[in-house]
Image (tube, coloured by chain):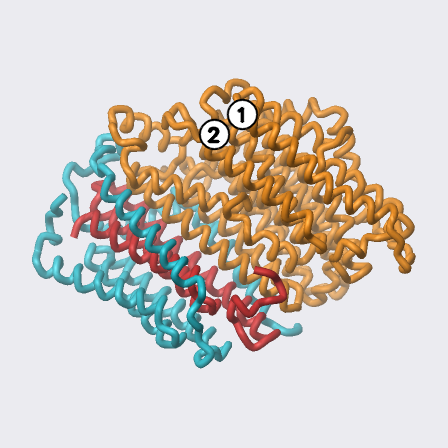
Amino acid sequence: MNSFITTDELLLIAPEISMVILATLVIILDLVIKNKSILNFVASFGLLVPIALSFNLLDGTSQFAFAGALRVDYFGVFFKIITLFATLITILISEKYSKKFDDYQGEYYALILISASGMMLLASSVEFITIYIALELSALPLAALITFIRIRSSAESGIKFMVLSALSSAILLYGMVLVYGFTGTTYIEDLSQIINRSLINSELTFGGGALLLGVILITCGFAFKISSAPFHMWAPDVYEGAPTPITAFLSVASKAAGFAVILRIVYSSFSNEQIGMDWSVLIATLSAISMTLGNLIAIQQTNIKRLFAYSTIAQAGYIMVGLAALSSLDGGQDNAGPAGILFYLFGYLLTNFAAFTVITLVSINTNSDSISSYSGLLKRSRLLTLIMTISMISLIGLPPSVGFMAKIYIFGSAMDTGLQWLAIFGVLNSVVSAFYYLKIVKIMLIDENENSEKIQLTTNMSLAGLSCVFGIVILGIFPGSIIEVAHRAVESII
Amino acid sequence: MISQGIASSLTVEISFWVISISTILSAIAVVQIKDLFRASLFLILTFLGVAGLFILLGAEFLAGIQLMIYVGAISVLIIFAILMTREIEISNQSHYMRILVSMVALGFMLLAISLITSTDWNLIDSRSFPQNQTDEIIATVQNSIPTLSKMLLTEYVLAFEMVGVLLLAAVLGALALVREKK
Amino acid sequence: MTIIHFQFLSAILFSLGLYGVLARRSAVLILMSIELMLNAVNINLIGFVAFRGFGQEIQTFGQVLIIFVITIAAAELALAIAIILRIYRNKNSVNVDEMNILKG
């Protein structure tokens, strides 16, 4: 590989490049213009360029770029589009909120865009160095963004996130280096071949300890990123202190990016045929612990952001059901598990952002994140109550919402692969979760509040909220197209 | 696996043991000393030890980078932070979870060491490596600054550019956080 | 001086760093422990590069990774210290345990 960068390669990473260019543009505009509200407009409309470029890549071919470091395929582009939508909605709902950052709005939007570009690269990287750097590229700006509000709790959330993300990266890195040292490669596709060829005659499980240790450490590192048990404890504190739109971004986009890498690694290197180990028990246990822990603690919360942090831990547990189905030995025939993960993540994107549109608006209006400030929301804004109610229905997993379809699909995949107990566990957990989700609905609809001042929605806010709700309902009734897309995406990485 | 070449000489062997033991001792000091400022000085000693190991293995370029960035920049940053936050006297009290935590760390160390010892390092033989060029074990890093720089700008050009964007983001974030008002 | 020695050295340093991160309360000391862990990774890498008998391309990979790790560590630390300064401006202490606005 003696050439620097070819035009073809540039086209393959055009979405990421345009994100970085957009970020630079926003900073430059921030320097020259006085009216900062233009920044939101530029950032959100500018995002249409990377979105269009990503859809342009969605032609079903898989291409390698940069000496095999990136694999631009249907799967990667699917996650890019999820990240881009998440970024777009984050920017839309930041419109009023970002007034809090007065002089630093330009930096705020630029950092969101840079972090998103890291997540997009993460979705298509297939080589350890690139994965590590993309992970840092997405996490570092997030740490700064979490600290953006000039109050103490925000800064504490920031340092907590920073320390834990640095710790998890160090653990991940140690694992990656051990794998590199043992196998002599960092490309996750070569890895499977080398492991296959060399371990076939070995008496030692996994060919000895170093590789096993490496894989365990890599798993721990990623478990941090998707906030799954037992590495979930950072989520509530960080979510509570962060600016509300960033909490939403964190809970959806960075989780999706984490799952993208995990799926790639599990599929190409550590799938069960290659290692001959049944991972599903381990993953299923972690998944069950995640959902139970998340749901049980969420019930006691009085702060809506903390509640959503625990809810997001529980949701990570549901998504991991798909991972368990994938790694079970008799599974993986029709890819229902991984396709379910993709479908679930897409549904979760819509659902969580619908809820966070409301949370952002309420927190601007009442200056509080406590659940009691939602009382009497029906009188203050019918639209917000509608958005929040539909989002709660989808989070519980009741019809006719995308959450219902996604849960059916992902639990169904577990049933097919002999993990019936996990599916039943998931359904029971959904019932428990209904308790605290419906409590919010009850507070909104029934409880009285002396403050009955109407909440005004801006165009951006209502656009974000309504399009999410529209998506939730439409995909809840006609999920066929997105399931088909998810299957195509999964097939592209096999 | 007895190494050959320069590694076999006694001086190298002795300096390896001296450097590694002093590195470990200063690392223990970093995590044990109560005084922040002294701990940071021992951290510099650890960095120097790692640089010494790089030199010992013939990776002078990396040793240079280690000296410039870790000893030169990162240590200064840390000392700067200690001075700015004036926390030297406060120092850290003993933690009630110390024993539990040290058990966790010790457990990890024993696990790692036992797993590494049980590894059959010859299992994946050099024939399975792509672009294999060596038949024997060499105990030094090949002098490869030209290769290094070439690969940094060809095969790893994407990573290189990403690190550039990462540094931009770090500068942006740090500035936005630390400046009071524009 | 063999590959095993470097592995041991790296594992010991890494565990010391892990201990520091978990046991220390001062934010600056925690960051210093993370630097220890990253240095452990670098020792590990240079050990593999020197002793595993990799071809030149794969050897170079390890060195490239060391450069990237050092660079990213610097960026990470700079940002972390910016955040610590921010906390310090709000209240004159940077001990993690004293951050009692948020629960542990």
Left or right position of B83 against A212: right
Q: Residues within 10 Å of mark 2 (few under 14, many from 20)?
A: many
Q: Which chain is orange?
A: A
Q: Who's the residue at 66% across and 53% down the image?
A: A306
Q: Who's the residue at 84% across and 53% down the image?
A: A375
Q: In terms of depth relative to the viewer, which is nearer, A424 or C82?
A: A424
Q: Position of residue A279 (x, y in %)?
A: 44, 31
Q: Which chain is red?
A: C
Q: Is residue A209 above or below residue A102?
A: above
Q: Which chain is cyan?
A: B
Q: Chain of mark 1?
A: A
* Residue A178 in view of the camera: yes
Q: Position of residue A351 (x, y in %)?
A: 72, 39
Q: In terms of depth relative to the viewer, which is nearer, A256 or A240?
A: A240
Q: Do the dots labelled 1 and 2 sit on one chain? A: yes
Left or right position of B125 against B173: left
Q: Residues within 10 Å of mark 1 (few under 14, many from 20)?
A: many
Q: Position of residue A231 (x, y in %)?
A: 51, 48
| Mark 2 residue type | Ser
Q: Position of residue C3 (x, y in %)?
A: 21, 47
| Whole-number angstrom distance, CA of label 1 to CA of label 2 | 9 Å
Q: Which residue is mark 2?
A: A280
| Mark 1 residue type | Leu
On the rendered image, what quadrant is the N terminus of chain A found in?
top left
Residue A419's label in the rendered image is: 1
- CB atoms of marks 1 and 2 within 8 Å: yes
Left or right position of A289 against A33: left
